[in-house]
Image (cartoon, rainbow, N blue to C red):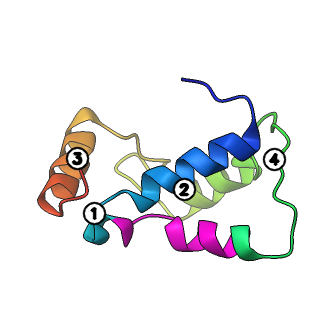
Amino acid sequence: ERVEDFGEWVHRFHAGLAALPEQQRHNTVLQMLLILLHSNHDVQAPEPTLGSFAPTDRFQAAVQAAHIGPDGDIPHVTAEVITKYVTDMQHLGLL
C-alpha cells in the first residue's frame, strides 16, 4: 500500500518498528528515527533524487584501481550471495 502523506508514512513506519520483538528492534533504524522525531526539526519528505547521490564513475574507477572483485571491477551480487544473506539473517532471527 502506498501512503501519500509523509507524516502518516513516518507514523506507520515507527509503529511497525516499535511493534517488533525487542531483539529485532535493536537491529533497526528505530533509534535514529526517534532522534529525528524528537529533534526540533520539521521532518519533511526528502526531494526525489534523479540518478545517484555520488559520482558512480569515480567509485568504479577506485574499485578498478584497487583490483577489487574477481574481475577487478565492481562485484555483482549473485543469487548465491543473496541466499547466504537471507539464511544468515534467518539464523540471527532478523527474518
Q: Which residue is mark 2?
A: 14
Q: Which residue is mark 1?
A: 21
Left or right of 86, for residue 48: right
Dot in front, 3 or 4? 4
Element marked by disc 2: helix
- Real-space Cα separation, disc 3 to disc 4, in angstroms: 29 Å
Write down the region rendered in magenta. 25-36
Within-10-Å neighbours for mark 2: few <14, some 14–19, many 20+ = some
Q: Are marks 1 and 3 in contact (CB under 8 Å)?
A: no
Dot in front, 2 or 3? 2
Q: Main secondary structure of the magenta part?
A: helix
Disc 1 marks a residue whose amino acid type is Pro
Within-10-Å neighbours for mark 4: few <14, some 14–19, many 20+ = few
Residue 36, percent from left and from top: 71, 70
Q: In the figure, 92 relative to 45: above or below?
A: below
Left or right of 58, for residue 67: left
- Real-space Cα separation, disc 4 to disc 2, in angstroms: 17 Å
- Real-space Cα separation, disc 1 to disc 3, in angstroms: 19 Å
Left or right of 17, for residue 70: left
Instruction: Tell which circle, 4 or 2, labels the residue nearer the N-terminal end.
Output: 2
- Real-space Cα separation, disc 2 to disc 1, in angstroms: 14 Å
Q: Which mark is residue 46?
A: 4
Q: In the figure, 41 relative to 17: above or below?
A: below
